Amino acid sequence: MTRIRKFWSIVTACGILLAAVAGEGQFHSQQVVKKVPTTHKVVALTFDDGPHPKTTPALLSVLQAKNVKATFFVLGENAEKFPAALKTIVDAGEEVGNHSYSHRFSRKISDADFIEEVARGEQAIAKIAPKPSLYRPPGGGYSDRRVMDLKQMGYTTVLWTVDTRDWEGRSSNDIINTVMKNVKPGDIVLMHEGDCARGTPAAVEVIIDKLREQGYNFVTVSELLQYYEMRE
Ligand SMILES: [Zn+2]
């Protein structure tokens, strides 16, 4: 284990050096992505905790009608429970990320359990979707060690900038207002699937229209990562 850790610390050091040489405009996958610095009016909508037999079809119907691609951070156990719903996400051309197997908070579990959660989530998801390369930690908790483990497993850690708190059962209007008040170019918007987030699909429909009126385009998180720009 020590030897492996040492190996990875050297790999990391080299990675950081390369990133420094490459310049600030490059995206460094070692880091945690909360937003992407860009002057382009792009925003990524993200939906956690699915797939879900009710909210997945409702969200897809809005996204497809508006021709918007979003990123779904799904749970492995829900992928196993609702494989047909996950398949509809994939077939619609939406992006699928890993949100762990069973939503255990990564800071509260052992290193081995954490890796198991990520790997089991991936196995369940990859039976239906392409192998994910984006990981969103349940509850948003992370540490340098976790980010490094994820990097080693081929993942970029993705958080968010705009938290709609839609899982609290907030109304569509509240969700819309939170996004409209806070969103900026390069932001990642956090929303959810599931019984607690019933106001979300209707909110998404309005959010897309209102942001488009302001000149925004919608991209997946992977696409958003391409927008890294040199900071002045
Ligand atoms: Zn979650």
Image: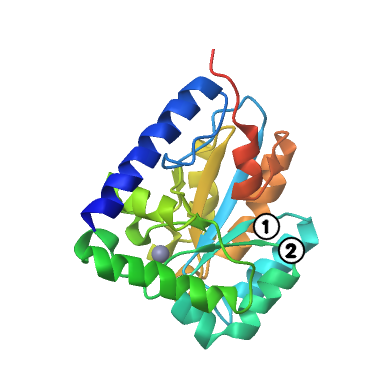
In this view, the residue in front, 21 or 141, is 21
Q: What residue did someone put label 2 on?
A: 93
Q: Which mark is residue 205?
A: 1
Q: Position of residue 73 (x, y in %)?
A: 51, 63
Give the side of residue 127 with respect to residue 48, left or right: right
Three-letter amino acid code of the residue under disc 2: Gly
Q: Position of residue 200 (x, y in %)?
A: 55, 63
Crowd class of label 1 (few under 14; some 14 to 19; many from 20; radius 10 Å): some
Residue at mark 2 to residue at mark 1: CA–CA distance: 18 Å
In this view, the residue in front, 19 or 202, is 19
Q: Which quadrant of the figure contains the N terminus?
A: bottom left
On screen, residue 176 above or below 13:
below
**Residue under the point 22% across and 66% down:** 109
**Residue under the point 59% across and 30% down:** 228
In this view, the residue in front, 81 or 148, is 148
On screen, residue 74 above or below 232:
below
User: Can the viewer see residue 192?
Assistant: yes
Kindly state the secondary structure of the residue where label 2 is placed: loop
Q: Which mark is residue 73?
A: none
